[in-house]
Image: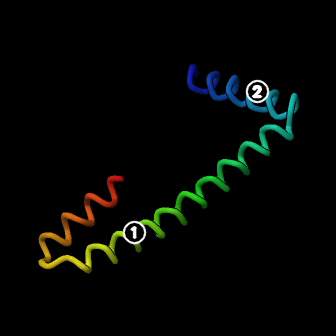
Amino acid sequence: MKKLLGILVLGLLFISIDLINPTTVKATIFHLIERKINNTLDYFEKRKKCQEEADRADTVYLGKERYKDCMKE
């Protein structure tokens, strides 16, 4: 019963937030989605750059170390 009441209260809270300022909530959601997509693209670009740097290493071990160091930056 407490869980049901908690769900009902949270549902009403989110509905009231949406009704008070619907554009801000929607804009925030779209902003978060856009930022997530940009972070994903940045990750793949960084991964490609680090892999190219690791491929230039003399040994496999040094390549792995360079890759790890590059991804930490």
Q: Position of residue 30 (x, y in %)?
A: 73, 51
Question: Where is the N terminus found, in terms of image quarters?
Answer: top right
**Residue 9 horizontal side relative to residue 63, left or right:** right
Q: Quadrant of residue 13?
A: top right
- Residue 14, image quadrant: top right
Location of residue 10 in the rendering, given as x and y in whole percent from the top left corner: 67, 27
Within-10-Å neighbours for mark 2: few <14, some 14–19, many 20+: few
**Which residue has dot 2 on it?**
12
User: Which is nearer the N-term, disc 2 or disc 1?
Assistant: 2
In front: label 2 or label 1:
1
Distance, label 2 to label 1, CA atoms, is 44 Å
Residue drawn where x is 14% and y is 79% of the image: 58
Q: Nearer the viewer, residue 14 or 53?
A: 53
The disc at residue 23 is: none
Helix, strand or loop under label 2:
helix
Give how far across and how far down residue 41 sits, in percent.
54, 66
Instruction: Answer whether labels 2 and 1 touch (C-beta < 8 Å).
Output: no
**Residue at x 20%, y 68% (from the top left corner):** 64
Residue on which the image places disc 1:
47
Residue 62 in percent (x, y) is at: 15, 70
Give the amino acid at mark 2: Leu
